[in-house]
Image (cartoon, helix red, strand yellow):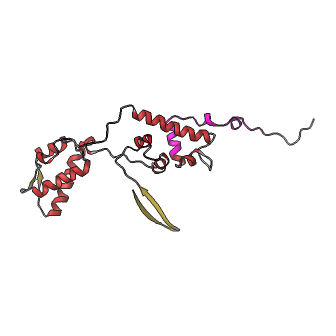
Amino acid sequence: MQTRPLLCARGFLVRVIAATNRNLQVAIQAGTFRSDLFYRLNVFPIDMPPVRERREDIPVLVEYFVDHCARKVGKNIQGITKESLDLLRSYPWPGNIRELQSAIERSVIMCETENFSVDKTWLAQQPLATEPKIPLDLSEKLAAQEKEIIEGALRESAGRVFGPCGAATKLGIARSTLESKIRSLKISKKSFRTFAETIPRRSWPESVSF
């Protein structure tokens, strides 16, 4: 997690940037991560898929890391062999971007020509241990659990989203975030309003003359 102070006229504004390689929805379900903290941090999520799921980016990443590492060690590398590029694109990269960077840095150090190449024996022969595969229906279960949490907060707040006693305050998230989740999960706020609130108010005259 990183915090970056931003200057403003009356003091400091703080922007919090948090990153993780864990599935926080699974962690919440397992009870190892607080749901209220998740909702506080989950204001503007950015999902970054692993390298193995965006292989079209590998040539660009390889070119950048080769140039960066070559400059650092003082080597002049002009090109990349097709065999090495195909090898890097086909490798599953269980260590993600860090493994790719380390493999390229090692190859640059060992490279004795102007053409970059990778020895396939340097890459891990056996896949490294990774997180257990998530069942296909887990996303549906997590969505159902999230819906249950939000509905519970709406029930306690009688259908109110904002305000001191609103569901957004109880969950510790922004009103806009909660409204977005209510729409995506197809939750009806009206169903949680109390009976008294559903009766339309009538304006009565102060006096009636016959």
Q: Quadrant of the N terminus?
A: bottom left
Is 2 part of what is drawn in magenta? no
Residue 97: give x, y in percent of width and height.
Answer: 25, 50
Residue 205: give x, y in percent of width and height.
Answer: 84, 40
Is 189 part of what is drawn in magenta? yes
Quadrant in the rendering for residue 208: top right
Q: Determine the residue located farthest toward the left in the rendered image.
A: 113
Query: What residue sits 22% from the left and 44% below the top?
Result: 93
Q: Nearer the viewer, residue 203 or 53?
A: 53
Q: Determine the residue located farthest toward the top in the rendered image.
A: 137
Query: What residue sits 86% from the left and 43% below the top?
Result: 206
**Relative to 159, is 121 on the left or the right?**
left
Query: What residue sits 41% from the left and 62% below the top?
Result: 4
Q: Nearer the viewer, residue 184 or 192?
A: 192
Quadrant in the rendering for residue 196: top right
**Over which residues does the magenta segment extend?**
177-202
Q: Would you place residue 151 above or below residue 101 in this image? A: above
**Relative to 204, is 46 on the left or the right?**
left
Q: How many marks?
A: 0
**Relative to 154, is 140 on the left or the right?**
left
Residue 42: give x, y in percent of width and height.
Answer: 45, 48
Residue 73: give x, y in percent of width and height.
Answer: 15, 63
Q: Determine the residue located farthest toward the front in the rendered image.
A: 31
Q: Nearer the viewer, residue 16 or 60?
A: 16
Q: Quadrant of the C terminus?
A: top right
